[in-house]
Image (spheres, rainbow, N blue to C red):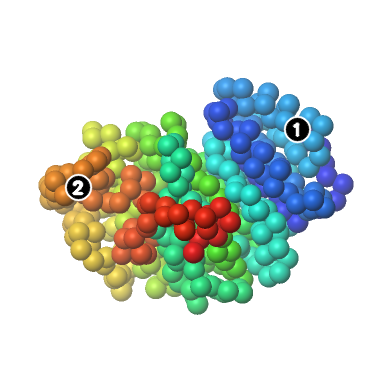
Amino acid sequence: MVKEPTHAPLLSIVVPVYGVEAYLYQCLESIRADIPAGESDAVELIAVDDASPDGCGDMLRAYAAGRDGIRVVHLSSNVGLGLARNAGLDVATGRYVWFVDSDDWLPPGTIAAVLDRLRQYQPDVLMLDHLRVHEDGRREVDASSPLLRGITGVTRLADQPRLLRVQHTAWNKVVRRDFMDELELRFFPGWYEDIPFSHPLLIGAEKISVLDRVCYLYRQGRQGAITSTRSSRHFDAFAQYERLMDWVARKHPDERLQAELFELMISHYLVVVGNDGRMHPHLRRDFFHRAAAHYRRYLPTGGYPLPPGATGLKHRLVGRGDWLAYSALRQAHRVAGRLRRPGPAAVDGGSPAVDEEPGRRAGNAPTRDGALTPERRDALAGGRLP
């Protein structure tokens, strides 16, 4: 049963929940305990139990009991992350919506900063910075984070095109609900559900605000995460990009924009096909040829800016559908990577991380600083990167 709020809050935080019993309490507490005194009416927390097979459903019932501002939706069957977000959205009453994944959490002071920025600029989309947190506690700056620097007030994608290369996830954006409805955006089923959701938000927004502050802690290496799961469901990415390209063709048929998205799409496919943690070897050839088919289908008539170096060469091989040459190049880069440095072999012939996405590669943004200096650690404790 969902308790209806007595009035509309400014912010609805939607948390889809599935198989995260070990992390759920940390996530919920990082939200509830961070709501400033006197602001309880401004924030509602909506947790969606996506028919979780563990104890998450009972945990949510117990957590919500006796606590105001927390609403729980229990789904009768598992529908997946995207549709669970939709279920939370259907009951959300806030002017703004923020989708937070239930295995991640917020650093202290986040909600106050978000509320302040929403009230100050009333944007269509508020973009947030984040850190990756590894199982050993190491915190890592994302390579796309520098793209958020130096943007004050409100802007548009046309004025700050680099924002399209910030990690394309739902959880690093707070969205005005009416704006989302105007764009007719919802999440689709399947993996990579953020692709046809995140990009259109930035493309259609008249007012984008950037909060240059670490507002989200993104857990890495969790068992069951799609970025570390070998599965044929990685082929879902093709349907999600088809939805994105169809939306852009209908709503914003701009050749420069299509060229930018095309480059991001092919780069993303190359990340997935080259990642041992996602792609089983016996599926790799089929995935490559599906990517080549999308290359031919969506190649802009005026071409597109080819990435430099080895990535650009891989783009050319995808364009030619040359699996044998790509496979040989990938293997050569992997061997060279092992010879150059100790530690685990690089993925996709030298990519800097196992789950790099478009906009998070060296060449699109300054190389990330994986180690935290004492100065940077102190800055992070204050919620802001230097």
Quick check: 295 left or right of 191? left
Give the secondary structure at mark 1: helix
Give the secondary structure at mark 2: loop
Q: Residue furthest front?
A: 374
Residue depicted at x 81% and y 39% = 68
Q: Residue furthest bottom?
A: 159
Circle 2 residue: 341
> Looking at numbered disc 2 in the image, what kind of residue is underneath it?
Arg
Rounded to the nearest whole Å, what is the CA distance between mark 1 and mark 2? 49 Å
Circle 1 residue: 64
Q: Quadrant of the N terminus?
A: top right
Question: Residue 40's x, y, as percent?
Answer: 80, 49
Residue depicted at x 82% and y 32% = 66
- The answer to which of marks 1 and 2 sits earlier in the sequence is 1
Residue depicted at x 48% and y 41% = 219
User: Which numbered mark, 1 or 2, is in the foreground of this view?
Assistant: 2
Q: Compared to 49, does 140 lie above or below?
A: below
